[in-house]
């Protein structure tokens, strides 16, 4: 499953995932043996490979010729792609898409190999042992596309309200490319919300790309919001001499995101965040959850009254974003980095790998109306001068790629964070009733007052991005000790009530939706080698806290007004 809707009608597309591939591990006792496995999936879900770290090769065959594009939605941690034994491209990071384009491929059957490496090492600054499981394999969809010499590479749509009549407008930027050997004349037209779109014919030189931009009015467009998530298909066609050469279908929603008077505004209304942090993790699927499992997670979140998902701590499968667009669930999406010390951030690959993740995340997911904020560098070294330089650069990069959404970082640097002047939203992870004593309100007062009186974060929206308590599913005790379901339910009742009644706070994300595996190299003090703070366990069985969260989240409006 590539997306929840069709993205091409002119361009021919075929999904290469959703079937068996040949899998060959290159390490350990099973090295060199071959077996058939389903793709997408995680290596650690294959029997006998639960703890596998090393290189592997995935193989399949396809029939095609001419110009082809291979799109990979996610390969972990690194991928080296070969066609017929010749390397065609490489990629680092499991959580962002990439593509490989081959021109003038001979017509016929071809062998596709993806060499995957899920080991940790100095070459990787972001994939490190951590408080979540870093799986290996081809974990998201793979697609094969046939391209003409001229094709549409991407489109970005930025909706806004016309000041004079409050009607919807949008800036639409189309990136077109020529992968042929000579200059070509491209004409691009489109249709969105019943309005025809036309750009001037342009010449694209061989091997070049051209960005076409225009601002258009959509008088009949309806607003996308949480209660009525109205979506529209944008259909673009690229023609040459009147003949359609390529197309691209995207889905957009007309909504605005802003920051004013210490609130985040969706369509001008101050939104109250009632969310969950969610990892891509499941005991059966690893991080390669099928669409049905993702949809089930979201149905549970909505049943509990949640209106937002935080994609901790990496960009998520686009299927989740498509579903959140359709369901009216707001998304905090963040780049891939968690808990990195200054020493780890000084890895010579850190800045380059972070920049690549940010670029790939925003370019691929720009059009999702559900995404209301971009996050970076969860709990990293924002209390050091070197860390401050890194935060400043990454915030600037996000702003250069997208000026329509606010930015933030989930911090745990209490009274020491040096980076609160850069983002539009100040965010903190706090764990009163779990890691430290004191009431939730006392913790909020302490941190919020410091931000307002002593930092450049004063006057900005203030958001709690993690709060919660652990519980082992089925562990009950009359004493209500920590790790019991009773203790978690009681702690969450206090946490939710006090945070959502704290009028200076924008809202909260509970850590976390479900129990998840952690890296055994990281393990630390996690019972069952898992982070057990889920409201449901890894199998989505409900803990006592489920009904507590549902009752409280459902009792608060989605908005502050």
Image: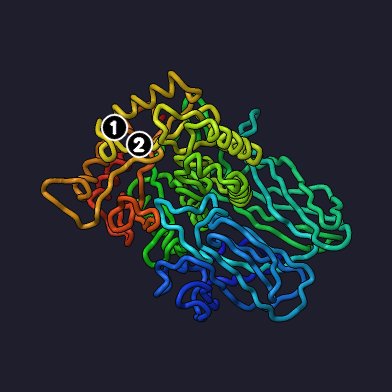
How packed mark 2 is, by other alpha carbons closer than 10 Å (few <14, some 14-19, many 20 or more), is many
Residue 120 vs residue 212, the one in the foreground = 120
> In front here: 327 or 363?
363
Tell me the tag on residue 440.
Answer: 1
* Residue occupying the point 65% across, 61% down: 90
Question: Would you say 190 lies left or right of 149 here?
Answer: left
What is the distance, in whole Å, between disc 2 and disc 1 at their CAs?
9 Å
Looking at the image, residue 483 sits to the left or right of residue 318; the answer is left
Residue 149, percent from left and from top: 80, 63
Q: Residue furthest left?
A: 478
Tell me residue 388's x, y (percent): 54, 32
Give above or below for 283 relative to 502. below
Q: Is residue 429 left or right of residue 551?
A: right
What percent of the width, then of the height, locates residue 55?
54, 68
Q: Is residue 227 visible?
A: no
**Image quarter (top left, top right, bottom left or bottom right) of the C terminus:** top left
Point out the residue furthest to the right here: 182
Mark 2 near mark 1, Cβ–Cβ under 8 Å? yes
Q: Residue at x 50, y 23 (%)?
A: 456
Residue 206 percent location from the top left of the image: 85, 57
Task: Please say if 260 is above or below 63.
Answer: above
Rendering quarter of residue 218:
top right
Look at the image and tell me whether residue 240 can be seen. yes
Residue 126, compared with residue 2, is above or below; it is: above
- Dot 1 lies on which element? helix
- The residue under the point 73% across, 50% down is 175
Q: Which of pointers 2 and 1 lies earlier in the amino acid sequence?
A: 2
Total number of numbered discs in the rendering: 2
Q: Which residue is mark 2?
A: 430
Check residue 40 in the rendering and tell me which mark sits there, or answer none: none
Mark nearer the viewer, 2 or 1? 2
């Amino acid at each position: 499953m590539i997306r929840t809707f069709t993205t091409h009608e002119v361009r021919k597309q075929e999904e290469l995932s959703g079937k068996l591939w040949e899998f060959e591990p290159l390490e350990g006792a099973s090295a060199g043996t071959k077996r058939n496995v389903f793709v997408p999936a995680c290596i650690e879900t294959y029997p006998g490979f639960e703890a596998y770290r090393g290189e592997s090769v995935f193989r399949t065959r396809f029939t095609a010729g001419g110009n082809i594009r291979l799109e990979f939605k996610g390969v972990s941690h690194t991928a080296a792609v070969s066609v017929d034994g010749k390397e065609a491209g490489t990629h680092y990071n499991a959580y962002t898409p990439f593509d490989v384009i081959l021109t003038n491929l001979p017509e016929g059957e071809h062998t596709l190999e993806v060499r995957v490496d899920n080991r940790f090492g100095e070459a990787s600054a972001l994939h490190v042992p951590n408080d979540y499981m870093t799986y290996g394999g081809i974990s998201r969809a793979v697609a094969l596309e046939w391209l003409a010499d001229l094709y549409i590479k991407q489109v970005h749509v930025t909706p806004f309200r016309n000041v004079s009549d409050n009607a919807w407008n949008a800036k639409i930027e189309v990136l077109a490319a020529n992968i042929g050997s000579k200059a070509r004349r491209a004409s691009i037209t489109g249709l969105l919300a019943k309005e025809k779109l036309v750009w001037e014919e342009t010449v694209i030189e061989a091997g070049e790309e051209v960005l076409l931009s225009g601002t258009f009015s959509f008088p009949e467009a309806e607003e996308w919001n949480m209660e009525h998530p109205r979506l529209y298909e944008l259909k673009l066609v690229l023609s040459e001499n009147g003949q359609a050469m390529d197309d691209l279908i995207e889905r957009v929603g007309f909504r605005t995101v802003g920051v004013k008077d210490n609130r985040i505004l969706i369509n001008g209304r101050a939104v109250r965040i009632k969310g969950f942090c969610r990892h891509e993790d499941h005991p059966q699927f690893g991080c390669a959850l099928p669409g049905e499992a993702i949809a089930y997670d979201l149905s549970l979140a909505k049943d509990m009254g949640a209106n937002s998902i935080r994609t901790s701590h990496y960009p998520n499968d686009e299927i989740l974003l498509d579903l959140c667009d359709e369901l009216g669930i707001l998304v905090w999406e963040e780049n891939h980095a968690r808990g990195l010390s200054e020493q780890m951030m000084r890895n010579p690959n850190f800045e380059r790998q972070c920049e690549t993740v940010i670029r790939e995340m925003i370019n691929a997911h720009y059009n999702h109306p559900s995404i209301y904020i971009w996050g970076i560098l969860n709990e990293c070294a924002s209390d050091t001068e070197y860390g401050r330089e890194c935060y400043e650069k990454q915030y600037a990069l996000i702003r250069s790629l997208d000026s329509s959404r606010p930015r933030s970082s989930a911090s745990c640097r209490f009274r020491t964070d040096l980076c609160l002047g850069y983002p539009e939203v100040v965010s903190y992870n706090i764990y009163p009733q779990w890691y430290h004593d004191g009431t939730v309100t006392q913790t909020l007062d302490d941190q919020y007052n410091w931000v307002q009186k002593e930092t450049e974060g004063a006057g900005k929206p203030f958001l709690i991005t993690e709060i919660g308590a652990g519980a082992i599913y089925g562990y009950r005790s009359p004493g209500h000790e920590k790790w019991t379901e009773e203790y978690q339910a009681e702690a969450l009742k206090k946490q939710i009530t006090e945070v959502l009644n704290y009028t200076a706070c924008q809202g909260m994300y509970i850590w976390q939706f479900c129990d998840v595996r952690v890296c055994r190299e990281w393990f630390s003090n996690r019972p069952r080698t898992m982070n057990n703070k889920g409201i449901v366990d890894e199998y989505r069985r409900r803990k006592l806290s489920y009904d507590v969260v549902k009752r409280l989240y459902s009792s608060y409006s989605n908005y502050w007004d």
